[in-house]
Image (cartoon, rainbow, N blue to C red):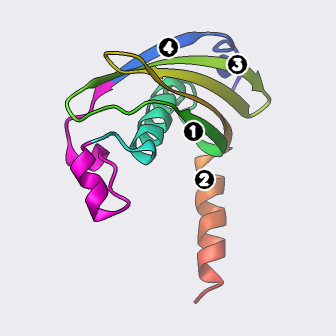
C-alpha cells in the first residue's frame, strides 16, 4: 500500500476509440441513431483505465469506486478517438481520489472526479459470499 502513496499528484494518459456499438448512447432505441458516445460507456472506460493505473501496485487488493461525479459537456461521434488525462489528487490510507479531463479529436468533452477504496480481494469475496448466503 505504501507504493500507492508514490502515485499522488502523478499524471497518466489513456485513449480509446469509439469504434464499437457498445460505446453508443442507447437508453432509448431512437438515441442509437445519433451514433454518440454514451456517458455510461465513458465512465466505464475512465474506471477501467484507473484500474490499470492501480493494479500493478496492489496485487492482493482491488480498488472499488466509492463515489463519482462527471460533467459530460460535449458529444463525441462514432469513430472518434478519445484521450483521457488522469491525475491522482490524493492518496489517504486506502482511499485514492482521481481527477480526469477527457478530450476527443476536436475538443474537451468531459471532466470527472471520483474516489476508489482499496480493499482486500479475500475480504471482498468473503463479504459477498456472506451477503449472498442470506438470500438462500
Extreme-bottom residue of the structure: 136
Disc 2, disc 1: CB below 8 Å? Answer: yes
User: Mark 3: which secondary structure?
Assistant: strand
Which residues make up the magenta segment? Answer: 16-35
7 or 69: nearer the viewer: 69
* For marks 2 and 1 on the same chain, the one whose residue lies earlier in the sequence: 1
- Say whether residue 46 is magenta: no
Residue with the mark numbered 2? 122
Residue with the mark numbered 3? 89
Q: Which mark is residue 12?
A: 4
Residue with the mark numbered 1? 60
Q: What residue is shown at x 31% (from left), y 54% (from top)?
A: 31
66 or 52: nearer the viewer: 66
Cα–Cα gap, marks 2 and 4: 29 Å
Image spot of residue 53 (x, y percent):
50, 24
Quarter holding the C terminus is bottom right
Badge 3: few (under 14), some or many (20 or more) residues near its Cα, within 10 Å?
some
Image spot of residue 79 (x, y percent):
19, 30
* For marks 1 and 4 on the same chain, the one whose residue lies earlier in the sequence: 4
The quadrant holding residue 57 is top right
Amino acid at each position: 500500500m505504501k507504493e500507492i502513496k508514490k502515485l499522488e499528484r502523478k499524471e497518466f494518459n489513456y485513449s480509446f476509440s469509439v469504434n464499437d456499438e457498445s460505446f453508443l448512447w442507447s437508453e432509448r432505441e431512437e438515441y442509437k441513431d445519433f451514433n454518440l458516445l454514451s456517458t455510461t460507456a465513458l465512465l466505464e472506460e475512465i474506471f477501467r483505465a484507473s484500474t490499470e493505473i492501480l493494479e500493478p501496485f496492489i496485487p492482493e487488493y482491488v480498488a472499488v469506486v466509492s463515489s463519482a461525479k462527471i460533467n459530460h459537456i460535449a458529444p463525441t461521434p462514432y469513430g472518434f478517438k478519445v484521450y483521457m488525462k488522469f491525475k491522482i489528487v490524493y492518496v489517504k490510507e486506502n482511499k485514492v481520489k482521481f481527477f480526469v479531463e477527457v478530450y476527443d479529436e476536436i475538443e474537451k468533452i468531459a471532466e470527472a472526479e471520483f474516489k476508489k477504496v482499496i480493499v482486500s480481494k479475500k475480504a471482498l469475496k468473503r463479504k459477498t459470499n456472506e451477503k449472498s448466503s442470506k438470500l438462500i
